[in-house]
Structures are given as structure tokens and as C-alpha cells.
Amino acid sequence: MKLPHQRLTRRLALGGLAATTLAAPARAQARPLKIGMITSLSGPFAALGESMRGGMRLLLTQSGERFADRPVELIVEDDQARPDDGVRKARKLIGQDRVDLLCGVIHSGVALALRDVVTEARMPTFLLGSANDLARRAASPFILRPTKTNWMLGSTAAQRTHQTHPGARVVTAASDYAAGREFVGDFATTYQGLGGRIGRQFWTPLGTPDFGPLLTAIAAERPDSVYVFFAGSDAVRFLRQWKEYRLAGRIRLMATGACFDQEDVLPAVGDAALGGINTFHQSPTAPSSAAFVEAWGATGKGLPGEFSTTGYVCGQVIRTATERSGGNPTDWPRTQQALFDAPVETAFGRMPFDPRNGQAILDIHVNEVRAVDGAMVNTVVYTFPQIRDPGPDA
Amino acid sequence: MPDALGYGAVQTLNALSFSALLLLNGLGLSVVLSLMNFVNLAHGSFFLLGSYVAIFWLGSGAPWWLAFPAAFLAAGLAGLLLDRFPFRRFYARPHLMQVLLTYGLSLIFADLMRWGIGAQILTPELPDMLKGVVFIGDMPFPIFRLFLIGAGTVLGLALWLLLDRTIWGAVLRAAVTDRGIVETLGIDTRRVFTVVLVLSAGLGGLSGALGAGMLAAYPGLDEEVLLLALVTVVVGGLGSFGGSVAGALVVGFTLTFSKVWLPEFANLAAFGALVLLLLVRPAGIVAPALRRL
């Protein structure tokens, strides 16, 4: 079909004029940088996915939607926290939208599924998710990982327990799936390596409605300390019932950061979280995140948690990658080398990348939940500087 | 284990409080399923709606105990509207059609609630009266859970009296067995069915309001509680009130004590036991007295 000739209307003329004047300063190479983001906007991680997208959007707004003077176009796709959907969306972004870079992912299962897809397609990817294997057997030359691994949190929690309460008998309780097994496994191995005693290990199915039986069993064990991993609604139920069963204050509670996530969990549990200790790569009181925390708060969303910070940091790393590669991060060997050569300053702190596996080396904070003006805030009480996953040595 | 008696007693109370929640949750579903032969997979949406209503009510500073009637009324109203359109047209249709309709509606409601309220996890601010604990031996047990057990018992008893011991309950049961005969007696059975659906939706909302204190409220909770309700109703046996009570107790105790004794295999052990039970008694624990012609 032949298109009808467009008549020269006033609107069209004005539009054309505006387009030419706006386009004039841009250089010839300023084809937009297309970034594809895969995250969970529906399903169990919907709230986390919204936060991740929000963090990335905030960084883009702050950067004037341009990295290294090149306009940036962000295309977000929803994986519904399902590996097969994630793979389909990645193929769509690579094949149909022809993105220059991929980033994102919350669910580690999706991340592991995407690993092969992006490696096969030789697609530069900033892959999140935290399964240890992503920095080990599943590491890929096309993947950089600007986030933590589960080992980083589990092992530092053990070190901290040993520091402050040497000889404490620790009971563990966690959601029974891959992440829970890794956190608790790494905690127990490290703690026993330091000479600590591990008592009973409790596992509950993901999505446990009632923690009463578990809490009663923990109370009967009378441990010095409990190490737990729960996330999202499980964390909210566990902490509320922890207080209802009067374990708060009687048994020391140590957890992974997700269990006390600033955005997702703390507002829902209130003072039931008070005094909880957790190890995390994110904290709203970490000095490195101060500027981000202020900017995030200015959008009216309260204090940021893990995933809004992760989205923002992922954007910061991509921005640095674009700058260091002269506006062309798709020149992957050069981009990678530039990121290996010098650390990136991010809201997670100074972030070097391990050249062996592309995994970020991170400061891990020990947070204590404290009441600040009536709100529960993860407050940094100690920092393990520059923790590096054992990677291929593990 | 220093105090085996207190430990056993508290775990039993844990099981009872979870059973009470299952009973409340299952009753609404069971009433429409057994009395009207209508499969309502949107029942979880009533539960979640009730949870949200109660959470906002308790946060507003109005008298706390009114949160529960408010949740009942809100969900009941939703049920009334749905009865007018489109449920009424599907009461006489095959189960598959009902499943398609109500499952689709539950997805729509989930999105509407997510859009209106957001995806964050919410929990109710319980009144001080319900916040304490009682000690059994030296094991603590929350008062809120005693309240749940009490509420489950009272509501269960009231519903049983209503359906099994009043003339209105008799009319309802007769209408299910033979609608034509009841109509010839001059009773508008459509009205009867409307009342049952509103009652069921209201019970869903009320159980959501009570359950929010244990389960919190968030998108996706609707599906989780629907699954528990279906298990409760199927295990207990369709068509009888005693069945729902038996189902709730069996499921509640199995799920709780599998967590106590075999925490690693809790779901496997619990649902394995339930499958065995259904193999032995395919119609549920309390098989319905055959009223069908």
C-alpha cells in the first residue's frame, strides 16, 4: 500500500523544526544506547521488581537520560519470576528489540537460565540474582555481576557471630529452597570452621502460613542465637510471630539482610524487628549510599531497600561502563577490561570486579535494626570491607 | 526438652489455632460448594479483601472489634454484586464453566487490588488486648491465637445452628435437593441462593480479617488461602457441615505436627497423609448422607 503524501501542516512544520534544533548538538554516533531490563513485575517478587525498576529509572533521570552523552533507552520486561518466561523475554529483547546490553533479574533460577542464553548470544549482560554458582560454575565471559552472592552474606554472619558471641550455640531456620540452603550452608560451614557449635537446623517450605510450630520448637531448644533466612511474606510472618511468641529479647536473632529488608519487610513488621542483626551489602545508613538515599526519599518512597539500591547501582555500573568505553559499552572486551582495571564508585560502596568471574567485590555491612524517629532503620554497626566470593576456588 | 508437657500443650494449641483459621476459611467455600453445587475459585479474593478492610480499619483508630463486621459487610457486598452478575447465570452450568469464570474473576480481582492498594506486604495493628501471651508451663502462647480458636468455634457453631437447626436452613437444603418442588411451595429459590452467596463471601471476608493477624496481606495471598480452603473442604467431605470441621482439624493437625516432627519434609508428610486418607475415604472424612435422588 502506498502511503498518502503528508500535507505540510503547521503542527508538522513545528515538530520538524523542534526535532532538527534538538538533534543538532548530538553527535553522529549518538544512536541511543538500548538497555534491556528483565525483572519480576508480577508474581511473588512483584514489589521487588518495581523497586529495581524504580532505582534504575531514578539513575536515568539523574543522568538526564544520557550516559556519556549518548541517549539511553530502557526497555523493561517482566519475567514473572519464572525461568522459562525470563528466557523468552531475553530472546525477545535480544532478537526483536536488538538491545545493546541486558541487565536485571531477581530470582536466581531466572538468572541461571539466562546465563546460557546470553552467553550463546554473546550479549553483554549485567546479571543480578545471588546464587553462588553465578560466580562459580555458571560464570560467563559475557556477564558482569554488580551484586552479592549468598556466600558473602552467610559467611560474614558466621564471622560476626564468632566475633561478638564466641562459643554461642546457634540453631538455624530457613526457607527450604536453593537460596536458604546456600545461606545456612555457608553460615554453618564458616561458623564450624571457626570452632562454633551449630544446633538443630530447621527447614520450612517457602510460603509457610504458620510459624507457630517452628517457633515453639525453637523456644524448646533454648539456643543462644538463631540464624535465619526468610524473605518477603515469610519474613514478615516469621518476625511478627517471633515477637508474638515472646522470643524477641530472649534469643539473639541473626539473619540475612533480606529478612529485614528496609523496603519490603521493616514497614510491615514494625517494632517486631527491633534489635535484629543482619549481614547485608545494602544499608540506608551506609555512607556510600547517602546521596542515593536522599534522592530516593525525595521521590516520596521512604528509605530504600535491597532492590531499589540494586537497580540504581546496576545503572551506575552501566553508566561507568559507557563512559570508560567512550560511549560504546558493546565493545565488550574493552568495557570489561576498563571495569576490571579500576573500581566503580556505587551506592554499595567502592566496587571492584573480580577478573576471574566478573563478580563484584563488596563491603558487607552488619546492620542492627534500631528505632529512629519511630521508624525501624537498618543501622550499620560494623563493616566487613571488600569481601570476595571464593569463585572458581570454591 | 525441659518441659515436655507444656511443649506438647502449646503445639496442640498451635494446631488448634491453625485449624480454626482453616475452618473459617473453608466454611465459606464449603457452603456454596456443598449447598449450591457452585465452585467459587474467587473465594480467596473475598479473603484478601477482608484482610485489607480489617488492616485499614484497625489502622484508622475506630473501635477495633468493628473491623470484623466491616470486613464481613464489605466482602458480603462484593458477593451480592457478583451474584447479580455474573454468578447467577452460572449456578446451573457445569463445574468446568464455573471454574473458568471464577478463576478468571479471581485474576481480575487480584490485579484490581494490587492496582488500588499496591504490592507491599501489610499487617494489622492488633489491639493491646490481643497482644499478650499466656504461659503454659514455661512455654508462651499468644492471646491472639486463643482469640482465633474462640472465633472459629463460635462462628462454626452459629453456622451449624443456622443451616442444620433452623427452618431457613431446611429450606436451603431442600432447594439444593429439588429446586422445582421448593418453588412450587411458593419460595423464591433465587433469593435463597443470593443469601447463601452473600453469606459465603462475608465469611470469606471475615476469615480474612481474622487471618490477617497470622498471615499478613499481600498480592498472592488469595491463591494461597484458596488452596488451603480447597484441601480442607475436600478432605472433610462435601455436603456436610461436620465434614468441614473434621477437615479443618485433620489438615490443621497434620500440617502442624508434620512441622514439629519432620520439619524438613513437612509438606510431603502432611499432604502424603492427606492423599492416603482420601484413598481410604474418597468422599472425605464425613461422607455426605445421600440426599440426591
Image: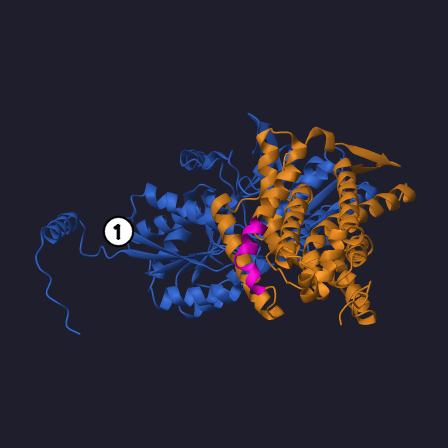
Q: Is residue A253 above or below residue A106?
A: above
Give percent across and percent down for residue B272.
77, 66
Q: Colour of chain A?
A: blue
Instruction: Pick whichever, A258 or A362, lies toward us.
Output: A258
Instruction: Pick whichever, A75 or A250, lies toward us.
Output: A75
Is B89 magenta? The answer is yes
Q: Provide the chain ID for the residue under circle 1.
A: A
Is A45 magenta? The answer is no
Q: Is residue B291 above or below residue A285?
A: below
Judge whether residue A258 can be spotted in this image.
no
Mostly what secondary structure, the magenta segment? Answer: helix
Part of the protein shown in magenta: B78-90
Q: Label 1 belongs to which residue?
A: A70
Q: Determine whether, in the image, residue B105 is placed left or right of residue A224.
A: left
Judge whether residue B106 can be spotted in this image.
yes
Q: Which chain is orange?
A: B
Give percent across and percent down for residue A355.
46, 56
Residue B285 figure quarter:
bottom right
**Dividing the image into 4 quarters, which one contains the C terminus of chain A?**
bottom right
Q: Determine whether, in the image, residue A96 is placed left or right of residue B68.
A: left
Q: Is residue B190 above or below residue B282?
A: above
Q: Determine whether, in the image, residue A89 is placed left or right of residue B231.
A: left
**Dividing the image into 4 quarters, which one contains the N terminus of chain A?**
bottom left
Q: Amino acid at mark 1?
A: Arg
Residue at the top extreme, as displayed: A373
Residue at the left extreme, as displayed: A8
For label 1, the SS is strand
Using a 10 Å C-alpha cutoff, classify the residue at mark 1 as few (fewer than 14 neighbours), some (14 to 19) or many (20 or more): many
Q: Residue at x 52, y 64 (%)?
A: A83
